[in-house]
Image (cartoon, rainbow, N blue to C red):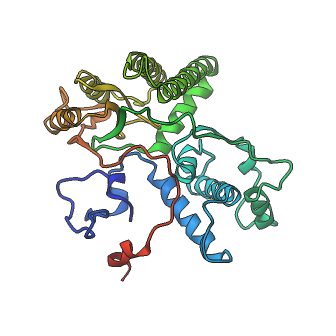
Amino acid sequence: MADSDYYSHAESSSSATLDDGRFLDFGVSLTQAHKTGLGSSAALVTAFTAAVLGYYKDGGHISLSSEYERACLHNLAQAAHCAAQGKVGSGFDVAAAVYGSCVYRRFSPSILQGLGEIGSKSFSSRLRAIVEDTDSLHKWDTEIDKSSSVIPKGLRLFMCDVDCGSETVGLVKQVLSWKKEDPDEAARLWTTLQKENEVLAQQLRRLSGDCGGSAGDYTNLSDIVLKIRSLIREMSSKAGVPIEPEVQTRLIDACCQLPGVVAGLVPGAGGFDAIALLVRDNEEVFRNLKDFLGSYRSPGDVAEGGTGIGKVRLLGVKQEMEGLKEEDAKIYANWIQ
């Protein structure tokens, strides 16, 4: 069970929901559900880890105001998520689930690679030392900066579901395989992309603190995102992986032609997941965008590998600075009776 925007809403889905419409019974098994690519796996692992920690902790809950307890939760959730995926990933989705929107620099993989197999001798002691960050040989070096991820006043972030999500693990494996085969070219692209991402963070920070002058002029922001998309498409082509598939390129380009739409891109691992759009915070812009997406059909409407882009719809999610939060169990009453 998860918030409905984690999954595409096929027309055949059941209409059974809670009174507030937050949870939807899709009428299919989890393996058949189309995900929108918003980090549902990491959110599930983080929420479950927090619930278990809270249950066994004195007082029955985690103190989210304690940076130490939040850090311990982050560390354990990262370990659990890596174990579930069978590899040490970027960790960004887990960090966002714990801390909220942030600019994130991943931890050194060796921190978790040294844990060993679950159930092996002294595993629990090693895990506790990693979670509590008391292992002097494997100190956490994650960097989390919340000040550089604020959406400037006058802009809103929208997500658009295209109803044909991808499997992140499979895409990443293909990209890493190309990286191993062509390390020099991969390093060049990775470095250039990282620099442009840092420029984007700087521009967002500048616009957030701009009280006049160029406030409302988003030309530079649009140009930076276009550069990032160009690099992603280059990586997509060289790795033979649809990180920004052509059908989504056409959709994003079409959206960016609408008045008030500043920029758009395929976030995360890409590959037919929901797209992100930065738009001016204006009701007329919202209405025009929603109407456009409601009738949008991609030219040809068939993606690479025979995957078609489905019905496009705006998701109800929005930018959020808050990460993990405690909720009232009553909203789950109809599902746990």
Front residue of 247 and 63: 63
Direction from residue 291 to residue 189 in the image, left or right: right
Examine the rendering and report whether any part of residue 116 can be seen. Answer: no
Residue in view at x 20 percent, y 32 percent = 301
Direction from residue 293 to residue 256 in the image, left or right: right
Front residue of 173 and 15: 15
Front residue of 322 and 129: 322
* Image location (x, y in percent) of residue 315: 29, 46
Examine the rendering and report whether any part of residue 158 can be seen. Answer: yes
The C terminus sits in image quarter: bottom left
The N terminus sits in image quarter: bottom left
Q: Residue furthest bottom?
A: 337
Front residue of 237 and 232: 232
* Image location (x, y in percent) of residue 31: 37, 58
Residue 288, placed above or below residue 96 = above
Residue in view at x 28 percent, y 63 percent = 24
Q: Residue furthest front?
A: 212
Residue 73, placed above or below residue 95 = below
Residue in view at x 63 percent, y 54 percent = 74
Residue in view at x 23 percent, y 40 percent = 312
* Image location (x, y in percent) of residue 330: 39, 76
Direction from residue 146 to residue 227 in the image, left or right: left
> Residue 103, located in which quarter of the rendered image?
top right
> Residue 282, located in which quarter of the rendered image?
top left
* Image location (x, y in percent) of residue 236: 44, 25
> Residue 259, located in which quarter of the rendered image?
top left
User: Number of callouts in the render?
Assistant: 0
